[in-house]
């Protein structure tokens, strides 16, 4: 059996040490196979970024993590800082939502893209040649000249392409994309998504694509995990999730997405998302769920397999209407 590219098993992240501290991530399990595109979807505050950053060993200050976290079989939680740095440079890299906040405005684009290569011992000339190819592969015109320019000379969309080029420099097998298109206008979003999906396929990378947009995740991913209040509440194939969502929260997210062919306004999920620390006992979604029953706040629903989907809803079987 080949080793999974990314395997997260029962990951719990607590903000302060000790069992008494309430977790912000609670028992999250997910995996990404080599070459597979996997979505992680949920509203703001559901724990997507904390989960995604954990993969690179980046935790909130003072946080304590427990569970299994492996990239290509290598255990992130027990890895030495040197090995972790190598892993971030070569094996797994991340693209963030806001390129302006992630790229140093005082340094040239070339320095940003070649940084990891130079640290890995590649010559200056070799790294610049490689950076030029990378900028070309993300559609930056006159890439050699672009290497000498500064971030403020680029639009947000172009700078996001630069960030993708930088993330690909070390030839990673795993790409973590945390809301990479959220800060961009719709047209630019589509361009960046198409660059990302093309490069992911060409380079046979595994990708964890984090977004609050379920429709986008379903369009570009093979499988999708839905997160609510620090837990996974549904996981299934993108196709299945889109056509037969099993968890009331997933159905609500789908209803919240405006459709081009529909002239009805999106109705979506009523109320606001809760974090785990404010969630009541039992099902964290209960206060917003139209199907809630008194029993829903008594027992915490664990993930169960139903027709090839994993669902954490006590009433999932009853709610299926095929
Ligand atoms: N550095 C941090 N310190 C304290 N709490 C944090 C930190 N980062 C995230 N959190 C909390 O963890 C929860 C999940 O946050 P996050 O993963 O950023 O959500 P998402 O990316 O889904 O919007 C939120 O309740 C947030 O307030
Ligand atoms: S367990 Fe109950 S409250 Fe939670 S999603 Fe299912 S029906 Fe709704
Ligand atoms: Mg986030």
Image (tube, helix red, strand yellow):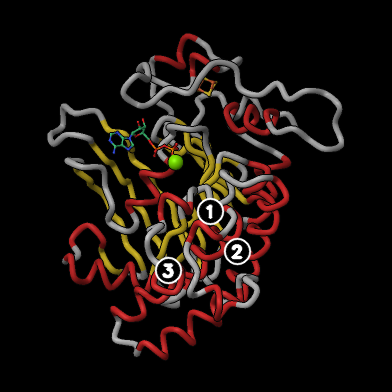
Outermost top residue:
294
Q: Which residue is mark 2?
A: 196
Q: Nearer the viewer, residue 81 or 155?
A: 155
User: In x, y percent, where is residue 301?
Assistant: 43, 28
Q: Secondary structure at mark 2?
A: helix
Q: Which quadrant of the figure contains the N terminus?
A: bottom left
Q: Which residue is mark 1?
A: 209
Q: Secondary structure at mark 3?
A: loop
Q: Give the quadrant of residue 169.
A: bottom left
Q: Nearer the viewer, residue 51 or 31?
A: 51
User: In x, y percent, where is residue 154?
Assistant: 56, 59
Nearest to N terminus: mark 2 or mark 3: 3
> Mark 2 to mark 3: distance in Å?
23 Å
Question: Is residue 6 placed above or below 203 in the rendered structure?
Answer: above
> Mark 3 to mark 1: distance in Å?
28 Å
Nearest to N terminus: mark 3 or mark 1: 3
Left/right placement of residue 83 relative to residue 116 reads left
Question: Is residue 244 placed above or below 119 in the rendered structure?
Answer: above
Q: Which residue is mark 3?
A: 108
On residue 188, which mark appears? none
> Mark 1 to mark 2: distance in Å?
10 Å
Residue at the image position 62 percent from the left and 34 percent from the top? 246
* Label tally: 3
Question: Is residue 9 placed above or below 142 in the rendered structure?
Answer: above
Does the residue at mark 1 contact the one at mark 2 (Cβ under 8 Å)? yes
Q: Nearer the viewer, residue 293 or 279?
A: 279
Residue at the image position 36 percent from the left and 80 percent from the top? 117
Residue at the image position 46 percent from the left and 69 percent from the top? 109
Of badges 2 and 3, the one in the foreground is: 3
User: In x, y percent, where is residue 313?
Assistant: 51, 28
| Residue 226 shows in this picture | yes
């Amino acid at each position: 059996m080949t080793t999974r590219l990314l395997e997260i098993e029962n990951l719990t992240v607590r903000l302060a040490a000790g069992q008494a501290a309430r977790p912000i991530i609670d028992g999250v399990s997910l995996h990404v196979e080599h070459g597979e595109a996997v979505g992680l979807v949920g509203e703001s505050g559901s724990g997507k970024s904390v989960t995604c950053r954990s993969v690179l060993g980046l935790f909130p200050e003072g946080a304590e993590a427990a569970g299994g976290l492996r990239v290509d079989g290598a255990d992130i939680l027990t890895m030495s800082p040197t090995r972790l740095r190598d892993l971030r440079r070569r094996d797994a890299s991340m693209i963030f939502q806001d390129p302006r906040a992630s790229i140093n405005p005082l340094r040239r684009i070339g320095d940003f893209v070649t940084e990891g290569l130079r640290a890995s011992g590649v010559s200056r000339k070799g790294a610049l040649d490689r950076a030029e190819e990378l900028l070309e592969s993300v559609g930056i015109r006159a890439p050699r000249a672009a290497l000498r320019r500064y971030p403020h000379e680029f639009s947000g969309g172009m700078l996001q392409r630069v960030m993708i080029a930088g993330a690909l420099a070390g030839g990673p097998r795993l790409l973590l994309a945390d809301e990479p298109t959220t800060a961009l206008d719709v047209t630019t979003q589509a361009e960046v998504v198409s660059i990302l999906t093309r490069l992911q396929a060409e380079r046979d990378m595994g990708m964890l694509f984090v977004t609050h947009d379920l429709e986008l995740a379903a369009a570009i991913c093979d499988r999708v995990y839905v997160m609510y209040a620090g837990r996974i509440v549904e996981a299934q194939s993108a196709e299945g999730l889109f056509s037969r969502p099993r968890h009331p929260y997933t159905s609500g997210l789908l209803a919240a997405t405006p459709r081009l062919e529909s002239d009805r306004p999106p109705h979506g999920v009523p109320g606001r998302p809760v974090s785990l620390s404010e969630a009541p006992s039992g099902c964290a979604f209960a206060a917003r769920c139209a199907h809630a029953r008194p029993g829903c706040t008594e027992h915490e629903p664990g993930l169960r397999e139903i027709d090839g989907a994993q669902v954490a809803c006590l009433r999932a079987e009853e709610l299926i209407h095929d």
